[in-house]
Image (tube, rainbow, N blue to C red):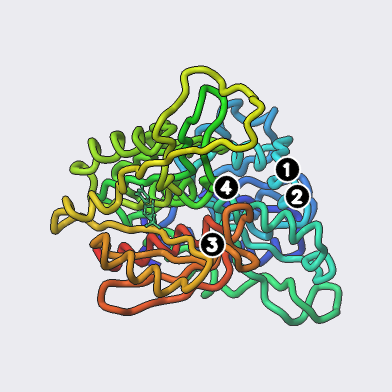
Amino acid sequence: MDACKGKKIVAGICGGIAVYKAAYIVSKLVQAGASVRVIMTRAACEFVTPLTFESLSQHRVFTDLFRDDPLAHVELAHTADLFVLMPATYNIIGKLAHGIADDFLTTTVAATRAPLLVIPAMESQMYTNPVFQENKKRLSELGYRFLEPETGHLASGRSGVGRFPSEEKIFKAIEEIFAERSLLKGRRVLVTAGPTREMLDPMRCITNKSSGKMGYALAEQARNLGADSVCLVSGPTLLEPPVGVEFVKVESAAEMHKAVTERFPKFDLILMAAAVADWRPKKAFSHKLKKSDARELTLVLEKTPDILSELGRRKKKNQILVGFAAETEKILEHAREKLRAKNLDLVVANDITAPGAGPEVETNIVTLLYRDGRSRTLPCMTKCEVAREVLREIARLL
Ligand code: C5P
């Protein structure tokens, strides 16, 4: 309960029968010392009147984007430490997953960077509807936290999944979020991501299938976990750099080497998730290579600098160095060898041929390997969840 003291929490109340339970949670949050500002959707106001939440939160309740203070949603979005959406309906999750912002609540959520805890409650056939599950997955991948509903008696009189969770579970989830927000406080984090491009001529290059998703997720989560600063050095990807992260765009292994080695001494935690080319054309042609009658063309490749090995040699006692090993065979054996040869503190290994893992999917299945021989395999999770879990593990090492 102590975790809520002095915190600014925005409660987004939607139109489901569990709204009466949400009223109780708002009351408990206020009793725990949080300052709670309530936003109600139009449907929520059909179930109970704003007066209930006004009395419990001791603040006026926001319901109408056009009648309330015109900038109130921006102010709430910027100052909140946490958003709790409860009960989160089929409708609100669908709207948020598709970027619809047509009322006070959805507009405020769109404008915030605060962590969001989503507490769905609904009839089980709505909860298990694939459309809903797809929207939930989409939001999870974007970093929204979902508290799973309980199974049991539902308002319809039926039994199934969809019950609003207990007060204990909700408070535990809130405490975890607040504890995590300071997990990397005082730390500076450097992340590499994406593929590299080794030019052969002005048009053609040698590259790989890395999407950059894992590295971008690590940078974003490091920021969310309270790191003092986060720098993302990225090869060419189609992704938007996360907000609040220093972004350095590079193309080749040589450029990545320069960007990383220059910055390395200033960082405490270095995560090398980039798929750096190991080889590059020895000679890059200044003109586009012409098609000729020759039946063969021989490319001579030379080694690129192994950035991680160099950092492993230069590493200071207070620096934590993490490597990634995307493998197709003898996964753990190769990863362990990398840990040793490159003087790493942790290796995150994955089998890129396994279903649910690899460069082109949203999920990953990874095994963490430590210096002391320990290892831990995580279940199949979204890359965002993998990133959070990896950073939690590292926080333990720190
Ligand atoms: O030895 P291997 O390339 O398989 O090791 C992968 C790890 O090394 C990754 O963390 C990757 O970012 C890093 N690496 C690097 N520089 C290279 C090649 C790989 O930093 N030239």
Q: Which residue is mark 4?
A: 209
Q: Residue at x 73, y 38 (%)?
A: 100
N-term-proximal mark, 3 vs 2 = 3
Q: Which residue is mark 3?
A: 27
The verdict on label 1 being within 8 Å of ligand 1 is no
The verdict on label 4 being within 8 Å of ligand 1 is no
- Identity, as a three-letter code, of the amino acid under mark 4: Lys
Q: Which residue is mark 2?
A: 94
N-term-proximal mark, 4 vs 2 = 2
- Identity, as a three-letter code, of the amino acid under mark 1: His
Are the two marked residues, 4 and 1, in contact with CB atoms closer than 8 angstroms? no
The verdict on label 2 being within 8 Å of ligand 1 is no
Establish if 259 lies above or below 393: above
Mark 1 vs mark 3, CA separation in Å: 31 Å
- Identity, as a three-letter code, of the amino acid under mark 3: Ser
Q: Nearer the viewer, residue 258 or 16?
A: 258
Are the two marked residues, 4 and 2, in contact with CB atoms closer than 8 angstroms? no
N-term-proximal mark, 4 vs 1 = 1
Establish if 163 lies above or below 9: below
Mark 4 vs mark 3, CA separation in Å: 51 Å
Q: Nearer the viewer, residue 140 or 384?
A: 384
Mark 4 vs mark 2, CA separation in Å: 31 Å
Mark 2, other Cα within 10 Å: few <14 / some 14–19 / many ≥20: some
